[in-house]
Image: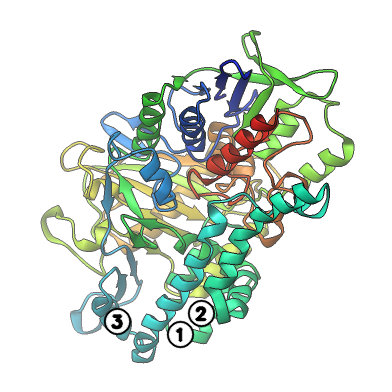
Amino acid sequence: MAAAVWTDRGTRAKNLLWILMGSRSNHTALKPCYDALAAYLQKGGVKTAVLERRHVLGGAAVTEEIFPGFHFSRCSYLLSLLRPHICRDLELKKHGLKVYMRDPHSFTPMLEEGMKGAAPRSLTLGSNLAKNLNEIGKFSQKDAKAYPDFVAHLEKLASAIHPLLDSPPVDIRGVTAGSLRKRLAATKTLTPIAKLGLKLGGNIPEFYEIITAPIMKILTRWFDSEPLIATLATDGVIGAMTSPSNPGSGYVLLHHVMGELEKEKGAWGYVEGGMGGLSQAIARSAQSYGVDVFTEKNVEQILVGSDGATKGVVLKDGAEIHSNVVLSNATPYATFKYLTPKGALSEEFIRAVDQVDYTSPVTKINVALDKLPNFLASPTPDDKPGPHHQCSVHLNCENVDILEAAYKDAINGRPSARPMLEMTIPSVLDPTLAPPGCHVVSLFTQFTPYHIKGREWTQQDREDFGDTVFDWVEQYAPGFKTSVVGREILSPPDLEKIFGLTGGNIFHGSMSLDQLYLARPLPSLSDYRSPIKGLYLCGSGCHPGGGVMGSPGWNAALTVISDLKRR
């Protein structure tokens, strides 16, 4: 499972540059950063080729027909954190990228008895502020009054981070060592930090607090009511093995609201044709610049010479491709534990790699339905979709106690008895995904451990957990279970095996404060360069982290091109 980039810089130098999408242990990348990187290198005059292990291009941003006629975003399922400049630079719309915006975007139904024959209550949020305030006012007028200021505050903090996303971290070694000329040149890497500080101004203490605090500390300062607090808290734990009361969950919330889509801040949308549509658009863009793209190629190992420098790669079929530059889009763990020859790295470095946290709470369930779910809290007649069907539907999110209990189950080694569920139904907006009258559903579920009471998952464990999830969905939308045509249950070990997400972690490593910016994935690796000369990292395990599509590749490209110019 590999992606390779071949570069030929004409009369200046000749290099083979390989972006590795995995290893003999079936490791691959979360996002299609490698194609974006290949495109930027090609635009910079570097002849490039991309190799992918699987039959489908895109790492975990892929579309696959799991059941006949039903096309799923099998792993990654929503788009937001693709940096706008990358979308513009690579002309992705020209190359087929189409996004369905969602408005409203969040729907939280409640399990309760309706009063006087009325439906159970629910909370629906979207881009219309007046409607949002009316929805929140059903639970608390005080919270409705506070909500606009909260959104503005969060947007200011999130937008301040943008300069950091689009640049490599500060070059600490360059600023503090070497000749005065080199140190002065390295001070340019301080510019994004300066921009962050200037944009935050007097909000620096609030920024520090939100990136370090439990999200509950922030939310309970602003609001009193459920399910508003619980709904917002889900973005503080999504994809992370943490609870809303744990320090650092505030940053996870900030990470998920700092994106934008079609110039709408914090928006998330569906890619037409599934997430593979994004990967295909990036690949077509790369190919338009002359990049060669190959699938069903498998890199077995990185070749390292006696001088400790990269010499190329060897494929699973034994073929060797010689090169002096290698970029790995696999996780740092897969890169250094599986792809790099034993003995090429120090024991001290390997111990540090072993300490990177890849804990995951996620089990992804893909479901084919022959009719649309009909929610008690917002019933719709004749199988017709309502506005809430296009949302992220938050189930078991009426109050934070439910989220806390689900988390405690997982840290005690068992799948949650009442799991936190995020349901999306992209076929409501995108008719290309399912046969007429049918739908595809994504269930992003938490919390499930990598091992169940210390043992491996069995197929029965998967089915039992799937039954638990479906039983809960059924309570919110009676008839759901009888509408199921087929289901695929991907536990954390399955996400690791199929998509190469070490530990099943969707971010290529925890987004905890000890694994961000200058420490992502390790302090010695924050500049994308490895201890092996010519070997670089370019995946989501690097700054700025998981989900920020294209930015790790963009930043790695800047680093590689800078190094090549010095040779």
| Residue 223 tag number | 1
Q: Earlier in the sequence, mark 1 or mark 3?
A: 3
Q: Residue 25: image x %, image y %?
A: 65, 27
Q: Residues within 10 Å of mark 2 (few under 14, many from 20)?
A: some
Q: Are marks 1 and 2 in contact (CB under 8 Å)?
A: yes
| Image position of 300 with respect to 117: above or below | above
The quadrant of the image that shows the C terminus is top right
- Residue in the picture at 22% in, 50% down: 428
Q: Residue 47: image x %, image y %?
A: 51, 21
* Residue at the front extreme, as displayed: 181
Question: Going by the image, does 333 lie left or right of 55?
Answer: right
Judging depth in this view, the residue of 167 and 29 nearest the camera is: 167
- Residue in the picture at 53% in, 41% down: 554
Q: Secondary structure at mark 3?
A: helix
Q: Earlier in the sequence, mark 2 or mark 3?
A: 3
| Residue 133 tag number | 3
Q: Residue 319: image x %, image y %?
A: 63, 8
Judging depth in this view, the residue of 168 and 400 nearest the camera is: 168
Q: Which residue is mark 2?
A: 219
The quadrant of the image that shows the N terminus is top right
